[in-house]
Amino acid sequence: MPTLLIGGPLDPVTPTEPLLTTIAQAVPTARLVDLPGASHFSNLDQPEAFTRALIGHLRDARAPDDDRVSPD
């Protein structure tokens, strides 16, 4: 399962270092995006960068059309 971890170095709850970095290393499909200057609400602190990361992740995680299952 593709996993996106977005964080900021100023986050006291889920800091990029070492917490999110450790998770990213443990999950083979994880991608870590560190947003400079962001804290716990990185989507509010860095909305443009957060949105770019999320859109890129969703596009990359999309299954090819032939992998999709449709009801009979």
Image (cartoon, rainbow, N blue to C red):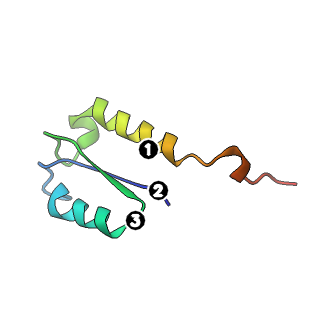
Name above or below for residue 32 compared with residue 22: above
Q: Of helix, strand and loop, which one carries label 1?
A: helix
29 with respect to 50 (left or right): right
Cα separation, mark 3 vs mark 2, equals: 9 Å
Q: In which quarter of the image is the C terminus?
A: bottom right
Residue with the mark numbered 1 = 57
- Tell me the residue at 61%/49% (across/down): 63
56 with respect to 25 (left or right): right
The answer to the question of whether label 1 and label 3 lie on touching residues, with beta carbons closer than 8 A, is: no
User: For the residue marked with disc 2, what is the amino acid?
Assistant: Pro
The answer to the question of whether label 3 and label 2 lie on touching residues, with beta carbons closer than 8 A, is: no
User: For the residue marked with disc 1, what is the amino acid?
Assistant: His
Q: Position of residue 67 (x, y in %)?
A: 70, 53
The earlier-in-sequence mark between 1 and 3 is 3
Cα separation, mark 1 vs mark 3, equals: 15 Å
Q: Quadrant of residue 20?
A: bottom left
The answer to the question of whether label 1 and label 2 lie on touching residues, with beta carbons closer than 8 A, is: yes
Cα separation, mark 1 vs mark 2, equals: 8 Å
Q: Where is residue 16 in the image (x, y as percent from the top left)?
A: 19, 55
Q: Of helix, strand and loop, which one carries label 3?
A: loop
Q: Of helix, strand and loop, which one carries label 2?
A: loop
Residue with the mark numbered 2 = 2
The label number, if any, that marks residue 47 in the structure image: none
The earlier-in-sequence mark between 3 and 2 is 2
- Tell me the residue at 36%/39% (across/down): 53
Residue with the mark numbered 3 = 28
User: For the residue marked with disc 3, what is the amino acid?
Assistant: Pro
Q: Where is residue 22 in the image (x, y as percent from the top left)?
A: 24, 67
